[in-house]
Image (cartoon, grey):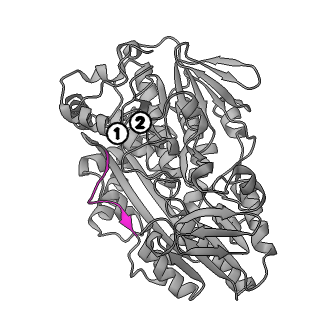
Amino acid sequence: MSHKLTRRDFNKLLLTGVAGSAFSLFGTSNTAFASSKRVVVIGGGFGGAAAAKYLRKLDPSISVTLVEPKAVFYTCPLSNWVLGGLKTMEDIAHTYTVLKNKYKVNVIADVVTDVDVTRSTVKLKGGQTLGYDRLIVSPGIDFKWDSVTGYSESVANSKMPHAYQAGPQTILLHKQLQAMRDGGKVLICPPGNPFRCPPGPYERASLIAGYLKEQKPKSKIIILDPKEKFSKQALFKKGWERLYPGMIEWRSGAMGGKVTKVDAATMSVTTEFGVENADVINFIPAQKAGKIAFDAGLTDATGWCPVNPVSFESTIHPGIHVIGDSSIAGAMPKSGFAASSQGKVAAAAIVRLFQGKVPAAPSLVNTCYSLLARNYGISVAGVYKLTVEGIVEIKEAGGLTPLDADDDQLKEEALFALGWYKNISMDTWG
Amino acid sequence: MAGKPGIRLTGFALLLMVLAAGSSAQGGVQAKKGEARRVESSPRGQILALSCTSCHGTDGKSVGIIPSISGRSADYLETALKAFKSGARYSTVMSRHAKGYSDSELRLIAEYFGTVSHNNK
């Protein structure tokens, strides 16, 4: 079995400064001009779909197969808008029709059950075996179901949805909120770092509060957070005071936010400070790389996948690229935007590698919009560059919506949030 | 697979790559206005510009409220990007992005979209 590098080993290796040509970065077998150019992409989310599309767009001589079990993909971005009643499930649904018809991606609705890194093949549940010259793995997140006592996949599917993979989970949480009495209590329990979409649980609290304020104004939301701080915290807290005074309470880990046990039968959670009952409980478990990444041996001790930051090629298995939430991408957050950015970087790198050329130094970006109300948007942006320490955020760039932004700016950001969603959806599936 | 070293990315080699990428920034687009032939943009320009399409749409063609980049000349885009970078032009988020790039990188991005627009004419 290959030696698995930890992130520390990786940095050490980068800093050691052992001389070598840039070509040797990608292994001798991969730098000759490739006569066979088959890429299989596992996962049709923001990362995988963007990679598949851009591979075909940048080099139509590459044959691309995308394996994704769902015929309709619901995005996590904007799924909080559905919970708040601002959008419908239809608004966040995407299919693979354009990838198939316009970009000639071979889309197979199936599940990958096995990756054979020695033979460079993947096996599908339906019985098919696909050979690849390069493989892209973009499976998103999986949950650590046993991270607290009492939680499980069946509890998530019946009583306490995580709604952190959009689809039936979003619908279940939405229904629970609609059925709740006025004066009810909603618990939102975000996980510890790292997790998908760091501002997600707080945007969710905002938009649920927006719905409750209109329909069930006596209700309350409590966020039980194991963390001491969270993404865009000052902007969220200011917005909550302005828009939903007294409706959202955030408890940090030190203030009793750490959930140790959940009980679906009594609809309660236990923290270090005691038992909390609620009408609706949105428990979001701790996370790890998607299952196929573990099965293929692409993960390290952190539960995520170490990659070469130039091409997102696995540092464990050459020839396999891991993008999106499952990858360890330095300073980049786990977001749909980041996954899409990484998908395009991996696609451009693979095109160059097939040509026997060195990939161009990547440039990566992220922008996460959060909506607090229909006309109240905030954002965090980051531009990332490659240094000897891996992917780092450029300090002079990026940052947050100003805390003193006026109503016009906040409205503009809300409009751009939707504008961004439309364009990234088109850039990925359209 | 077992005997293969998993990684050969060294600090020195990485620096070489970043430097090489910087020097290839001189390439750019050679096409003059009105030239009919298809022009190629630099790989570095391409990789920088692919970041923009997540908000501005594939090839810079926006379908929503965010302005399209498509159809603009390289010179127009370069001026706009530099104005966002300096803060001379108001924006919600563009200045936060533009500050992440050197002037020569902004030029490469502008040339990339200028080329895409040229080729799509």
Q: Quadrant of residue A268?
A: bottom right
Residue A322 drawn above or below residue A132: below
Q: Amino acid at mark 2?
A: Pro
Q: Residue at x 59, y 66 (%)?
A: A189
Q: Amino acid at mark 1?
A: Arg
Q: Chain of mark 1?
A: A
User: Of residues A378 and A227, which is closer to you in this image?
Assistant: A227
Q: Secondary structure at mark 1?
A: helix
Quarter of the image for the C terminus of chain A: give it.
top right
Does residue A178 show up? yes
Structural distance between the alpha carbons of marks 1 and 2 = 7 Å
Does residue B59 show up? no
User: Of residues A159 and A77, which is closer to you in this image?
Assistant: A159
Q: Quadrant of residue A63?
A: top right
Q: Which residue is mark 2?
A: A306
Residue A213 drawn above or below residue A338: below
User: Of residues A354 and A123, which is closer to you in this image?
Assistant: A123
Verify whether residue A273 appears in magenta: no
Residue A33, position as x, y percentages in the image = 41, 13
Q: Are marks 1 and 2 in contact (CB under 8 Å)?
A: yes
Residues packed near mark 2 inside 10 Å, few (<14), some (14 to 19) or many (20 plus) = many
**Total count of labels:** 2
Quarter of the image for the N terminus of chain A: give it.
top left
Residue A123 drawn above or below residue A239: above
Q: Identify the magenta region.
A: A391-400
Residue A163, position as x, y percentages in the image = 67, 58
Residue B104, position as x, y percentages in the image = 25, 47
Q: Mark 2 or mark 1, which is nearer the start of the sequence?
A: 1
Residue A211, position as x, y percentages in the image = 69, 78
Label ID, residue A7? 1
Residues packed near mark 1 inside 10 Å, few (<14), some (14 to 19) or many (20 plus) = some
